[in-house]
Amino acid sequence: MTFEFKLPDLGEGITEGEVVKWRIKEGDEVQEHQVVLEVETDKAIVEVPSPKKGRVVKLNKAEGDTVKVGETLVVIETLEAAGQAAEEGKRADAGAVVGTLPAEEAVFATPKARSIAKETGLDLAAMKGTGPGGIITEKDVRGAQSKAQVERPRETGKKTEDKYGVIERIPIKGVRKSIAKNLLSTLRNTAPVTGMEEADVTELWDLRQKEKKAAKDKGVHLTFMPFFMKAVQHALSQHPVLNGSVDEKGEEIIIKKYYNIGVAVDTPDGLMVSVVKDVEKKSILELASELQELAVKARERRITLEELKGSSFTISNYGSYGGMFATPIINYPDIAILGTGRITEKPWVKDGAIAIRKVLPLSLTFDHRVTDGGEAAKFLTRVVKYLEDPAMIFIESR
């Protein structure tokens, strides 16, 4: 008896995805709930398990193909009772005191490393352990996974010619397709306006420099982003209209009473916005630690859909790449996004005298349908005050 396994509804309004990697091939036997393929959808890679146990008869899609919800992914011939009994016998043998040791068990690796390697399809036998006695650790597996991501070849297209010379056609798919879709949604559904300001962040600069080592001793890389997030969170509490979204059908403005801040992360596959939940409940170090973890997961494509959803406001730190001012595009359906540019030394009037100070360029894009320039300017001014006097961030934090 054959069973057609169709792409299930993955939630979040997702209607299609791209087959990134098959974990099985035709002729393989699969177990119920075994992950059989990875599907990229809405910037995240989702592992799809098989609902049935059996033998793979046919893979209906190749890696790189687009598959819609409800389309057949793989045809499985379900195993008869005898076959199931044989499989159970094999498992019992493997678990006995006297029996055959599975090949993968011959590799010297920690249980956590073994689990991650199985999830990601990495070959433990090809890795060199750095743990005691040469044991393969979780860090070794993560490193191999990161290397595999970095070494993945750039998407190339078909080379051809137009009347001026050679051109290359690269398919718009995967993360780039998702980015294009989301940006068009923003431009279709918002009336974006950008306001700009500068902040003297000399004191914040000195504070971060002072606390970097203490944070590093705790395994945390302290960037400016956690401070930006806290400044934004406090400013949003006083200008709540910018912390929300628009219900297009109900024609209502939704003001969110929580502060889930999306942070744009540059990855080899394109820009992703990971979301840190409940910023108001977390310390600077907790935010730094979570940002560090989410950035790694995004670059390694291990980030989940849940970690990409639910933002109430977004920050894009393009300054780390050298940019100054910009017109960042709203992460729809958010109402606003703050862009932070490169901190530079500039002559600045301080206490009636000119001094060289650390200056941060800020760009706020907001949906003019929801609020006006005056409210947006007040919000941006409030953010500047928190960044110029970082002690206020700690005084007003719970």
Image (spheres, helix red, strand yellow):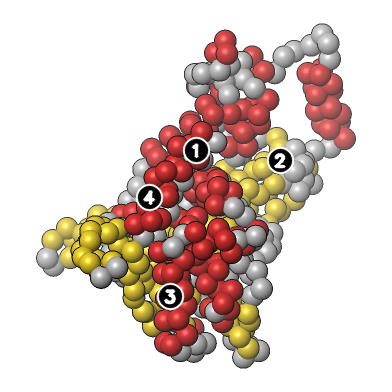
Residue bearing mark 4: 206
Residue topped by disc 2: 34
Disc 2 + disc 4, Cβ < 8 Å: no
Question: Dot 1 corresponds to which residue?
Answer: 214
Q: Mark 3 points at which residue?
A: 380
Q: How far apart are marks 3 and 1 (CA)?
A: 30 Å
Query: Of marks 2 and 3, which one's residue comes earlier in the chain?
Result: 2
Q: Nearer the viewer, residue 191 or 212?
A: 212
- For the residues marked 2 and 3, what is the alpha-carbon distance in whole angstroms? 50 Å
Label 1 sits on a secondary structure element that is helix
Q: Residues within 10 Å of mark 1 (few under 14, many from 20)?
A: few
Determine contact: label 4, label 1, CB under 8 Å: no
Is there any visible trace of residue 290 in the rendered image? no
Tag 2: amino acid? Gln
Q: Quadrant of residue 184?
A: bottom left
Which x, y percent locates residue 93? 82, 17
For the C terminus, the image quarter is: bottom right
For label 3, the SS is helix
Mark 3 or 1, closer to the camera:
1
Q: Nearer the viewer, residue 57 or 177?
A: 177
Sequence-wise, the earlier of marks 4 and 1 is 4
Instruction: Give percent across and percent down for residue 321.
Output: 31, 54
- Residue 23 vs 112, above or below: the answer is below
